[in-house]
Amino acid sequence: MIDPPLERLKERLYLSVPHMGGSELNYVRDAFDTNWLSTVGPNLTALEREVEALVGCSAAALSSGTAGLHLALRLVGVGEDDEVVTPTLSFAASANAIRYLGGVPVFLDSDHATWNMDPNLLESFLKKRAASNRLPKAVMVVHLFGQPAAMREIQQLCDRYALPLVEDAAESLGALYEGKHPGALADVGVYSFNGNKMITGTTGGMLVSPNGDWVAKARSWSSQALDPDPEGVSNYVHSELGYSYGMSNVVAGIVRGQLEVLDQRVTQRRRVFERYVQGLESLPEWQPQPEASRCRHSRWLSCFLLDESRSSITAYDVMRFLAALNVESRPVWRPMHLQPLYQRFEVVGGEVAEQLNRCGICLPSSSSMSAELQSFVVEAVKQASKTRLTLMEQS
C-alpha cells in the first residue's frame, strides 16, 4: 500500500544555501561607507586575525578555496611532473590544483571509517615507492563533507618519509579533530567560503599555516607578487610569477559576520543530521555516514549510504524521485579516477570510493531548513522506497 503521493514543492529545496547571521550587512556597509572596496581594507585585516585566533596559525584571505589549494601546493614545492598523492573521492578542485602546476595526481582510495584517504593504503603505497626510490613530492588530504580524515596516521607517514602534507579543508570548517581544527594540522591548509559552505562570503577562501613566512609568501603571490621597489615610488617590480587571487574587503565583511555564527551553524547542521537519522530509522538499508573516532563531524552535508544487499532500489532512484518533487540531492562525489579528465592517472584501489559514489546520497542540509521541510524529505525517501518495491512486486 503506497501512501498518498507527495505534492511537488512550489519552490526548489536546495542542498545547502547561505544563512546570514545579522552582522554581515554592518561590515559590508562599513566597507562602502569608508570606500574600502578593493582587495585591501580593515575587514580583510580583521578577518585574517579572527581566523588566526580560531585555528591557531597564520592566515591569508583569498578569492577562493581553489586559489588557496593552488598556492598551498606551490608553497610545498610542487612543480612540473611532480606526483602528489590525493584522494580519488573528492571534488575536482583538489586534483585540478595539482594540474595547474603541471603536477601529476596519484589517486588513493577511501576507507569505510571516514570516507576519506585510507591511511593503510597510503602506508603500503609509500613503502613500495620508497623501495624503488620514487617517493611523491607531497600528499594532499581532503576532509569530506565535514568529516576529518585520519590525520594522526597520515601525518606520521608523511613525517616518516619527509613529505609535506597539504589539507584541503574546504568542506570542513567547524569540524574538530582531537579538539583541533582540520586545515590547521599540517604544513598548510585551505578553507572555502563558497556560497554553499558552512559559512559563506558568497565566494572566497583562506590559506592557513603554522609557517608565517609561507603565509606571507602566499599573500604576495595572491596580489601579483609585487616586489618592494628600491626606488620607493611603486614602480611595479616583479621577480616572481603572481596571480590575482586576493579577497575583496567587501567579501571579507560578509565572512566576518558569518564567522560570528560558525558554532551555531555547526550545531544546527548536526541537528539536521540527527533528525534524518531519527526519521529514517525505519529504513535500516540507509546507513548514516559514521562520525570517525577522535572527531567532531560538522555535518556540512548529511550523507547516507544505501546497503545494496538490503534494498530493491538504488540511491539514484531516490535522487530522481526527489528531483521530481523539486528537492535537490546529490551523489557522494564521483571518484576522480572515473572522470574523463583523470582516467589516465594512477589510482591505488578505488573500489570503496566507487561504492560510496554508487550508493551514497547527500540530502538537503541547510542550517536554515525548517523541520517541516526536512520531514517532507524524509517522507519522500520513504515513499521512493515503497513505490519502487511495489512496482517490482507487481511486475
Image (cartoon, helix red, strand yellow):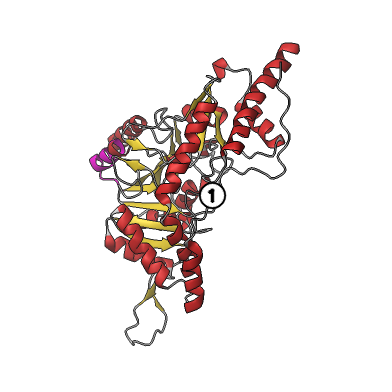
Which residue sits furthest left?
160
Residue 280 image offset from top left, x and y in percent: 54, 25
Type of the residue with mark 1:
Asn
User: Which residue in the protein does label 1 denote?
Assistant: 196
User: Residue 356, relative to residue 95: is it above or below?
Assistant: above
Residue 70 image offset from top left, x and y in percent: 44, 56
Residue 237 image offset from top left, x and y in percent: 39, 79
Q: Nearer the viewer, residue 293 or 144?
A: 293
In this view of the protein, can residue 35 be seen by the observer? no
Residue name at image x 36 percent, y 51 percent: 189
In this view of the protein, can residue 326 be seen by the observer? yes
Left or right: residue 73 versus residue 155 is: right
Q: Which residue range is magenta in the image?
A: 153-164
Q: Nearer the viewer, residue 103 or 355?
A: 355
Residue name at image x 34 percent, y 42 percent: 176
Determine which quarter of the picture holds residue 10. Answer: top right
Check residue 161 for magenta coloring.
Answer: yes
